[in-house]
Each structure stands twice: as structure tokens, then as C-alpha cells.
Image (cartoon, helix red, strand yellow):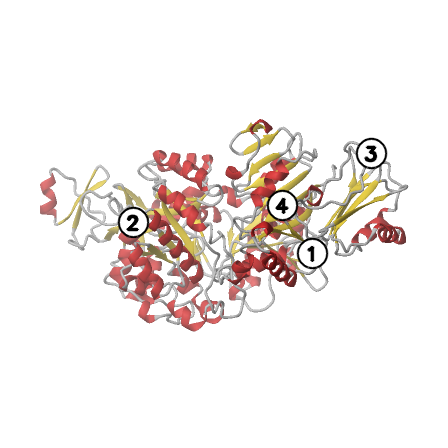
Amino acid sequence: MDAPVPLSVIGGFLGTGKTTLLNQLLNNRSGVRFAVLVNDFGDIVVDGDLITEHNGQSMTFANGCVCCSLGNDLLAALTQLLQRDDPPEQIIVEASGVADPRNIADFAALNAELYRDLVIVLVDAQTLRQRALDERLSDTVRRQIAAADLIIMNKCDLVDDAERRATRLWLEAQRDDIPIIETEHARVPFDFLSAVPPSDAPVEETTQHPHAINHGELFRSETLDVAGPVDIAALRRSLEALPRSILRVKGFVPIQGRDEPFFLVQVSGNEVEISPWQGRAPARAGLIVIGTPDMPDKQQLAEIFSAEG
Amino acid sequence: MNSRRPIASHVAVRDGRILGAGPLEELAGWGAYELDERFAAKVIMPGLIEGHAHSWEGSAWEDTFVGYMARTAPNGVRHAGCDSIDEVVARLMDVEAAMTDPGEALMAWGFDPIYFDGPRMNLADLDRVSTTRPVLVMHASGHIVNGNSVLLARGNITASTNVQGLMKDGNGQPTGELQGPALRQIAYKAAGKDRFLDMGKGDSLWRFAYSAQRAGVTTATDLANELPEGTVESMAALTARDDFPLRIVPAFVGMSCSAEDGVKWVTSLIPRSNEKLRFGLVKLVADGSIQGFTARLKWPGYFNGAENGLWYIDPEELPQRLAAYHKAGLQVHIHTNGDQATEVTIDSIEQVLRQSPDADARFTLQHCQMAHDAHFRRMARLGICVNLFANHLYYWGDQHYAHTMGPERAHRMDAVGTAHRLGVAYTIHSDAPVTHLGPLFTAWCAVNRVTATGRVLGKNERIGVEDALHAITLGAAFTLKLDSEIGSIETGKRADFAILDDDPLSVDHMQLKDIPVWGTVIGGEVFPCSEIDCP
């Protein structure tokens, strides 16, 4: 069986920037083929010449991405996507503002062809605390935040520094266990959102900064080389033991005693996925580890993996 | 129910419509006639109108009924209620023993554990029914299912499955109880069926119509339906038949696509209406259910301390959706169970009406079970109609008293008397198959407000029998903007009648629900219950 397709959910109230974020994914130039499921693609904006097909239910783009309307039957929509001749490499489902995004992530957890990736919740730095005080919305806001694996605090350019800090503190009081990224115009580094390791280029060591925000480093990434075939059980143990400061691990690794040259490794939140890779051979074995600035450094990571190995 | 002539000895019908009602010598003025004395010893009422039911009432009966309250199937068979898990299991074992296809799943519906103390249904219970075929029991709420071991194995649901709605025992093993949309869909798929997709298809529409006929109902809503092309086609084909005994008013689910697409689709359906099928209605759902603790309540919330319920639509998006449909000239009904949902919806309608004034939009709040006087006053002034869920008083009134709302608010629930007193246009409903389809029973609930254990909830909220009969005829027609066509027996209206064996105005008001229905007349066609031929 092919490696399961990662499925992420993007939740957040109206006006928090979900569509802006989805537009960026659909227009990405990295080569990752996203499928995005939305309630309404009226607001999806793509350069006209990028759309190769538009049939009312789905739009196909020149970069291989596809955007489909969700309808009322998520299971059917997902099945259709997986049965395509060119199935997507990653699926993103937009949750309505008041839905519990975990209900959608459950569909991935229950389907062997899918892998439950992140539940990403967007909040609007301008309105979050106001909504949290609104009797009609406060518990829904809190439930949404409780469901998140990653919070994107958007529209930080529209509030002053004190307001931004206060909102961040409020969020940290709700969740001190997950990354909270501050952005404007929903600009989030692509590597954070993509569960798909680059297979056609050597893994580059990078430290990325979100655009246009200068509040210091918001997250780090490290790459780890993998010398030879590793023991799958030990690798799984290491991955499951990673500290919470690590949000994502992705890459390709050869496994002892297995004929396949590479296994795909994906970790997000609490989910660990290791499966035989049948796609194009990656340039080399290795893992990209992405997390908050306080995540273990390269040396410590190497120790975590070798100790268990 | 014609206010100028509430009682008449004869009704004259021509071409499916009413020429007039009155003494024979008056009606003879219309010309030559044929006197039909079949109903001489019966009572002819305007055809009853169910303003909130679902065609799911038809498909539900494909499965085994295991509800708590006894119920009559569309084929006339009376099914006793199951008042323990053991009784549910015993009934399923009987059904299983009669099944011939060894691979077929055994499906049941209506299970309502809110009535049972003690342990919840588990795998061992349903494994007693079968260890070779999938067994699936859907709860009355529609949100929870129980499965047996075969079902879980087919769905690949194991101890290592990690989703929040999977109930596990102390040893981490699944108990067979599956909550939430993902597990429910996987369970149905594992059973090889999808009831939700079957809604509104051929056989189930016949069953829905027969259920209605047995209750004296000549017009019922299907509230709501996605109305995909296949469903529209089968609805159009069946309702065009002379022998199909029901007028259907389907409401489109206005929230599973963009409002723009919804407006386009519903508008395109309107010309496909016929005399027994009327498109154009749209339904939105604001919150969940009170007994499921998913309704949105105002402070102080649930009596037992359960956390507040769920929005099914973003309160900030509601006015936008309402406005889109309203501006396109489409009528919208909105499900609001809890008082917070009701208030947010009234606020939203007020906002929409300020932008696009319309004194006769007839926005209708469906269920609206916890509204208080201030809400009804605003509804009256804004021209909002209400369809109150009177059957709840009997079915779950005791649970509302003890667990969900507490005594004071339980007395106020489904405040039919207040709606009447404050001049809100109202009707009452069953939400079939959530409760059984039967407007005379629903009227009985509004008149007596008696719970299953005999407690009277809110005696000041009771209404008179005549008002209750108005609610289930013209009152319902008004909420559907069909009051010029149906709902009363008077010149020009459709010849739709409920034929009763007894007079609702003369029986004891506690007997209202027990009046036998002989059959119906729809557009002058006679449909006796005795001739129903339903699988």
C-alpha cells in the first residue's frame, strides 16, 4: 500500500485568515500537491492561468494542487480524492468557524490511507480576547484552542505591541504545550505546514524566519543525517519520545531488514507514521526536525536518536 | 377551521378543490352533484399539516425500531417500546433469527438510553445478537451509534484507534459506543449502508407518505434535505402520481454549500414543483438538541452542570446566510433549540430585516423550546413565526425537569400558551422520526402538557383544543406560506381532508390523541388507511 496521505485541519472563526492561508498553499511553488477541501470556494484566489480545470465542484491548478468543495459528506469527498489518478500528497480540510476541528481529524485517524497531521487553529489577534469574553462564543473559542496542535495568531500587524503581547499571554495561559506562531496576512513558513519531505532536492539545513515579523526567532529547524539502515522499533521509540517543543519531523530513512530503499517518516503532534516509500527516490536519507526555538539542538537530537538506536 | 363557518354538514368538491362547505341545499347551487355518503358517520377535518418532519421517517423503518416509546410503523404494525438494554437485545435476537442473508448487517434505530439507569450498552450486549454479522444500533439523538464486535472489526476500530469519540473501558478496550460524525460514518460504511444518503429515495418516500396518511396528514415538510438531483427526481416522479398520498414541502439544507450556490440551486428547483411538491423553503440549523446537551443555552446553562452545547453555524455568519436567502426571496426556517440560539437567531433576523425590510418574510423558528416571553414579544413584533416541539413535553419532559433545564424552565418549555397570548403565529410538530408523526398527539401534548410519568409541565402554557387544531392545520400552513391553498375547508382551497372516527371537539381532551384516523383525502382522492399496502 502507498504511504498514507497526511491530512491537516485548519480551523478558526470567520475573518481569522483561513482562506488567505489556503490560498498560499494552493499557490505554492514547492511542488507539493495539496488538495484543499473548503466549504465555499468563492474566496479562493488563484492566478487565472494557474487554473487548468474548474467544474463547479473542484478546481485543478497547474502546480498539481486541487481545491474541492466539501459538501456534507467528508468521507465521500476524501474517498474521491484518494481515488484520483494523481492523488494529493497532502490534504487540508477547512473547518467551519464553530466546528470542533478534531471531528474532522478523526476521519484521518480512522482511515488507513490517511495520516492524521496537524489541527491548525487560526485566531485573529484583534478580536480573539473580545470573542473570548462574548458569552455566545467564549466556550467555542476555548474548545477550538483546546483542539489545536498549532495556533497561528494572525493579523499581528493590526494591533499594537502591548495588545499583541497580552493576546499571546492569554493564549499561552490556555495552551503552554503547543507552538503559537505570530503572523500577518496568514504568512506561515511553508515547511511548517507541509508534512511532505522534499524528495527531489538534497535536504538543506535552514533556519527560517516568518516574513516581516521581528519578534525574534519563532521556530527552528534542524536536519539530521541518517547513516545506514536503522531499527524501526528504536526509531519509533525515539520519535514518540520527542519533547513537545518539536512540532514536526519529516524525511526518508532506510530500515533494517527491509527491501524497500527508503521509508517515509512523518511526525506531527502525537502522531508517528513510518511507511515504505514507493515514490521517487529521495536524494539522500535524513530527517528534518522543526520546532520552537527551545527545541533540542542538533547535538541533543543526535543523542536522542542514537541513545534509542 | 374556516372561522366564518367552523362546522358544516357537507363539503362540495370539484377538480380536486373545494367548491364550498355548508348545508346540502346551499351547495346544490353549484349544479349537478353526486352525493358521497361514505363519511356520513365520520368527522371531516382539514387535512392535517406537519410543519416539521423528515423523509428520514420513511427510511428509518427499513431498520428495527428499538425506541423507548411504543410506535406504529408505516405498515400499521405496532412496535412496543424497549425499556431496557435487555429488551433491545431480545428484540434484535428475534430479528436476527429471521434474517436469511448471513452477510447482511442488522440495523436498529431509536435507542434512547436517557431513560435507563445503570451501565451503558456495550459490545457484549450486541455480541449476544450476532458474532457473525455487523449489528449497528443508532441512538435516538442520531449522533451516537453502538456496534458489535463484527462491526468494529470491519471498521478497523481497535484499542489502538485514537479518536476522541471512541468510548473505551478501564482496560482501554472499545465498548462499542461510537460518538461523533467520523465514527458514525465509518460504522455505517462498515455495515455496508448509508442511511443518510438514502433520505428521500423511492421506497422511503412511500413509507413517509403512509406514516403521514395514518396520522391524517395531507401535507408534510421534509425539513431538511440536501436535495441532490436524484432525490429531486424521485420526489418529483412520486408526487406526480395520483396514488401518492402526501403533499411534500422539502426544505433545502442551506449550510452545506455557499449561500450563493444554495440560492442558485433552490431557485432552479422552484419550477420543478408540482401540486404535491413545493420547493423554495430553506432551513438553517443554529444549534443541537437539549436532551443531547448540544443546544446553546443562556446563563445559567444546563441544570446538571453539563457544559454549554454546540453552534452548528457561526453566530457571526448566521445573518449573512439569512440575508443571502432572504434577498433572493426564499423563505428560511431556522432550527433553534436552546434560548441562546433563539436569541442569536432573532438578533440576526432583526439585522436582516433592517437591511431588507419585509413585513411578511415569515422567518420561522423551529423547535424554539426554551424561548421566554421577551423572545416571543420580539418575534411577534418582527413577524417571526414559531413551530414549537410540543411532543417533547411528553417524550422527554421528565428528563428536562430532572436533568437538562430543571423545574422552572421545564415548565416554560415549548411555551405554546405564551406564543398564542402574545400573538406569534405558531404551529406544533413531531420532528418525526425523532418522535412519532401524529398531529392529533402533538395537539394533545399542547392541550394537556403531560409528561410520560404524568407530570403536568406549565399548566399556564396549555392551549384549548380549538387552538391546537388550528395550530396543526392553518397554523402550519401559515408558516409554509401555503395558507391560501390548504389548512381549512373553504371555497377555493385544495380538497385535503383528514377523516376521523370521532370528533376532536367533543371527546375528552385527554382522549384527543386516541381518535382513530380512517384515512385522508388529497385533492379529492380518497386514501383509506385500510388499503395501505406497505412493506
For the residues marked 4 and 2, what is the alpha-carbon distance in whole angstroms?
42 Å
Q: Quadrant of the N terminus of chain A?
A: top right
Mark 3 vs mark 1: which is more N-terminal? 1
Cα gap from disc 4 to disc 1, whole angstroms: 35 Å
**Residue under pointer 1:** A178
Which badge, 4 or 2, is on the more N-terminal residue? 4
Looking at the image, how many numbered discs can be counted on the residues?
Answer: 4
Task: Name the front one of labels 4 and 1.
Answer: 1
Which of the pair B123/A62 is nearer the observer?
A: A62
Residue A274 lies, with reference to residue B471, above or below; the image says above
For badge 4, the amino acid type reads: Ala
Cα distance in 3D space between marks 4 and 3: 41 Å
- Looking at the rendered structure, the kind of residue marked 3 is Ala
Task: Please name the residue that numbered disc 4 is placed on.
Answer: B190
Per the image, the residue denoted by label 2 is B477
Disc marking residue B167: none
Q: Position of residue B2 (x, y in %)?
A: 19, 52
Quarter of the rendering containing residue B69:
bottom left
In space, the residues marked 1 and 2 are separated at their CA atoms by 54 Å
Examine the rendering and report whether any part of residue B165 can be seen. Answer: no
Are marks 3 and 2 in one subunit?
A: no
Q: Which chain does the residue under circle 2 lie in?
A: B
Q: Amino acid at mark 2?
A: Ala
Q: Position of residue B484 (x, y in %)?
A: 24, 45
**Residue B26 % position (x, y):** 9, 46
Task: Give the residue number, with chain letter if any, for mark 3.
Answer: A283
Callouts 4 and 3 close, C-beta under 8 Å: no
